[in-house]
Image (spheres, rainbow, N blue to C red):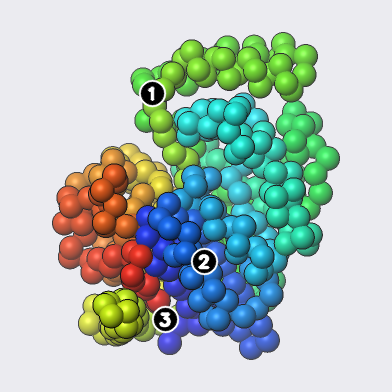
Amino acid sequence: MSSLICTFWGVGQGLFSSGKIKRDNNDFIWVYDCGTSSAKKFISNAIQAMKQDYPEEYIDLMMISHFDRDHINGIDELLRNYKVRYWLLPYYPLWKRLLVAHLSGINQENELFSFYLDPVNYLKKKYGDSLKECTFLLLPEIENKYEKITSPTSEINNDNLWFKEIKKDFKQDESYSNAQHIKLLDPYYSLLCNDVEFVPYNVPLNTLNLSGNILQNIQPKIDTIIKNSNNAKAMIQNLTKLYDSTFGKRNRNKISLFVYVNELNSFGFSSAEYYQIQPPYTVVFNQITCKKWGRFKNAILYTGDGYLSNPTEWANLQKVLGNDRISNIFALQVMHHGASSNWYSGLASQIKPTVSIFSADNTNCRYKHPHAQVVKDFLPYSPFLVNKLATLKLK
């Protein structure tokens, strides 16, 4: 049996996943996203169930794909139950953070706009007591150099989370210049703890599906604003005006942190346990052993609301993960609750996961996730629907 356990909690239209590395002294706990646009009771029930499964005091590694409500609105309650040791965040300079906010529909009247101005300070103020000992790990983009992310050597493997840091002068980004407990990660190295590697991929902004070369075309204007603005407030106002006039309401897009979790020296997951609540509210348990699927694999790929909507986006992910990691994907969290806009036909046969996980509310009339054509594409790869009434545990 794997020393990894991973759960995709049934929260409806959202995403909440937790996992742990079983160790002799204490377990290493991670969380990827925690939110839902369904009723709040679903995320509350899942957090309480997680607390029973993982009674530890700390989440060792917190990872949030992006800051949409249905991926983060459970964090308040989660951090009333846990403290955090490390929090992994995508890193962009301020002008790019403002662009991401615009493309996500976040304006200056939105409370979340403060996050894009100063992510670390925003989180510290909001979750102060739970983050007193937290170190923030900032992951830069991979720019113009899609190379395979390196796994650390086994000699450095221990109970602590290992990562490779690069030094950076944050003088041009005032929100980070005086910050404590911040590490800038080398994006070409994975993180490692007890033979389990976490491989994060921060999608470059220049790969976004923007109109033509629109970002490249306005780059000189961006550079001029940054150079000539007397203070941060003026720069924010001028950049916001530029983005409004350039993009308008078009090109809404999501930046989402991909994370690949892999146990390096393991035979693989041995079972998937599917819990469904059925009237009259009894839990139906179905355990599927991995012998059913043939070849054993031991990796999970989180995608959040990310895009693998064309062969180029898929090829970029292939390059940074490498074919050996791709071929080892046991569980794929299908992008954006199974939305067809984040996928292209035939993608499933490129990834070939053992199981495909759709975290969505299939009764939601507005979104109608997961979309039928996406589910059909993944039918050969054991699709599981994690919704209001179903939870999936991998062991």
Instruction: Give left or right: position of 183 versus 295.
Output: right
Q: What is the quadrant of residue 325 in the picture?
A: bottom left
Find numbered disc 2 in the image and state the secondary structure of the residue it sits on: helix
- Under mark 2, the amino acid is Ser
Q: Which mark is residue 55?
A: none
168 over 137 or under it: above or below: above
Q: Residue at x 44, y 39 (%)?
A: 254
Secondary structure state at the residue bearing disc 1? loop
Q: Decide if residue 182 is on the left or right side of residue 357.
A: right
For marks 1 and 2 on the same chain, the one whose residue lies earlier in the sequence: 2
Where disc 3 sits, the SS reads loop
Between 77 and 191, the one lying in front of the other is: 77
Image coordinates for residue 15, horizontal then vertical, percent: 43, 58
Q: CA distance from mark 3 to mark 1?
A: 43 Å
Q: Which mark is residue 395?
A: 3
> The disc labelled 1 sits on which kind of residue?
Arg
Residue at x 34%, y 71% (from the top left corner): 390
- Hey, which quadrant is residue 311 in on the image? top left
Q: Position of residue 276 (x, y in %)?
A: 31, 76
In the image: residue 332, left or right of residue 18? left
Q: How many marks?
A: 3
Disc 3 and disc 2: Cα gap in Å? 23 Å
Among the two numbered marks 3 and 2 on one chain, the one whose residue lies closer to the N terminus: 2
The residue that label 2 is drawn on is 44
Residue underneath mark 1: 250
